[in-house]
Image (tube, helix red, strand yellow):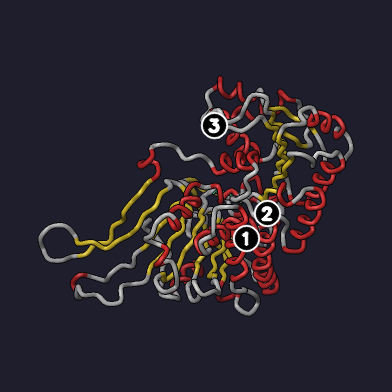
Amino acid sequence: QPVDAFDLVIFGGTGDLAVRKLLPALFHRFVDGQIPAGSRIIGIAREALDDDGYRASLRTALIEAGGAKGQVEEFLRHVSYRPLDARKDEGWDAFAALIGEEPDHVRVFYLSTSPELFVDICNRLGSYGLNRGKSRVVLEKPIGRDLASANQINDAVGRVFDESQTFRIDHYLGKETVQNLLALRFGNALFEPLWNSGHIDHVQITVAETLGVGRRGAYYDRAGALRDMVQNHILQLLCMVAMEPPSSLSPDAVRDEKLKVLRSLKPIDESNAAQLTVRGQYRAGAAEGQSVPGYLEELDGGKSNTETFVALKAEIENWRWAGVPFYLRTGKRLPERVSEIVVVFKAVPHSIFGASAGPLAQNRLVLRLQPDEGVKLWLTIKHPGPGGLRLRHVPLDMSFAEAFGVQQPDAYERLLLDVVRGNPTLFMRRDEVEAAWRWADPILAAWSASGEAPRPYTAGTWGPSAAVALIERDGRTWNEDS
Ligand code: BG6
């Protein structure tokens, strides 16, 4: 659907996220004709740059994102830059006047800065009246670093922007496979009757990255994997797997159901964190065939108890899921970049095939978020040919690229236009963020009370061996053949 011309202002416009993700996403929408003439994209940061300097800093990233030179230049005509500091008056009058030039535009203020600046920026926007009319604010995760700071931010933002104008982004919700989970669960009669503790043995969610923290150390060291990935992305995935069928796809119907899941998470605290969680931190090793430094070497200070890996066993205490473990893991510098949700069904109650047929593998539904988005359903079949009834476990395999032959759009492409359209279905409501912190805070507290350092793992391995033990203790294994 086409949208009207809009203004999109990116605070943190020179940052990693803006340059690597947001601008390339907008560029791709532009190439598809979805950024109408008259739209303006304005980068904001403290650096003293002019429009040309800013455009020059984006050019390489856009060309790397697959842009043809001519298209990149055309797109960059929509892009400008303003140096502004949320904590200083200078430049704000002129900025307000610039935004005021197009009073009918939808105005999106994307806060891609550290959360400590959210309040100052919103207060400024409010004091210049830029919160009125068709204004929207996008808050990048993590929102705060615990429940208390999230509350403070949400209260302060809420004094300037109404909840209906506030878009808390979690880009995992914009990933194609995550939305496909909705289609798969609620558009087929096949799965939903089995989608419960009667038929599902356990669920695994893995978000593995090969990258280290690189230049993001200053942010990452204050966050760690639980705050950076689990509290938001992984819990959102868990919600999409576990929620009850919403009555419709209206924003609140979906978010009400997700909230119930978050509120049903079994608490993990000092009494059980040692059994249910594993923290790790990478040491020097190899990634993609190259030797790479350890986390501590990448940090200036050289000392840190921040986890770059976490594995944990979560449970949802409700009728549908009681007793079904959700094993979650994520880490930097793991052997491959892979994100997937694996739903493992219970074993058949009795095998009629005898010992020679071999053990019967459990059915598995694997939803691959990246790379190679797709869905695989692992089934047991007869090995073809004569020679008795030998069994094999093979996937019904639906690769999106093969089935639809198109490159899937990046999550930010969809979500940015959802903000312009004013559709918050795939964004987190305030109470969801808070419920997620309510679960995460006691885990963080338990870790810090224990005083233990995260377990070391070599870069390029699947994290500390304790993460394997976490699942194998229960007679299960991490999915390997997706
Ligand atoms: C971000 C995290 O939210 O997600 C990063 O802050 C992480 O640490 C990134 O690398 C992963 O996103 P994606 O889309 O590449 O899986």
Residue receiving disc 2: 142
**Are there few (<14), some (14-19), or many (20+) residues within 10 Å of tag 3?**
few
| Disc 3 residue type (three-letter) | Glu
Residue receiving disc 1: 231
* Residue 335 seen in the figure: no
**Marks 1 & 2, CB-CB < 8 Å contact:** yes
Q: Decide if residue 437 is on the left or right side of residue 350.
A: right
Looking at the picture, tell me which residue is in the foreground, 28 or 126.
126
The CB of the residue at mark 2 lies under 8 Å from ligand 1: yes
Residue receiving disc 3: 64
* Residue at the outermost left position: 386
Q: Nearer the viewer, mark 1 or mark 3?
A: 1
| Disc 1 residue type (three-letter) | Gln
Residue at position x 71%, y 23% in the image = 52
Helix, strand or loop at label 1? It is helix
Residue 119 locus on image (x, y percent): 80, 50
Q: Is residue 39 above or below residue 183?
A: above
Label at residue 410? none
* Residue 129 seen in the figure: yes
| Disc 2 residue type (three-letter) | Pro
Q: Is residue 403 above or below residue 465?
A: above
Residue at position x 55%, y 44% in the image = 411
Specify the quadrant that holds the N terminus: top right
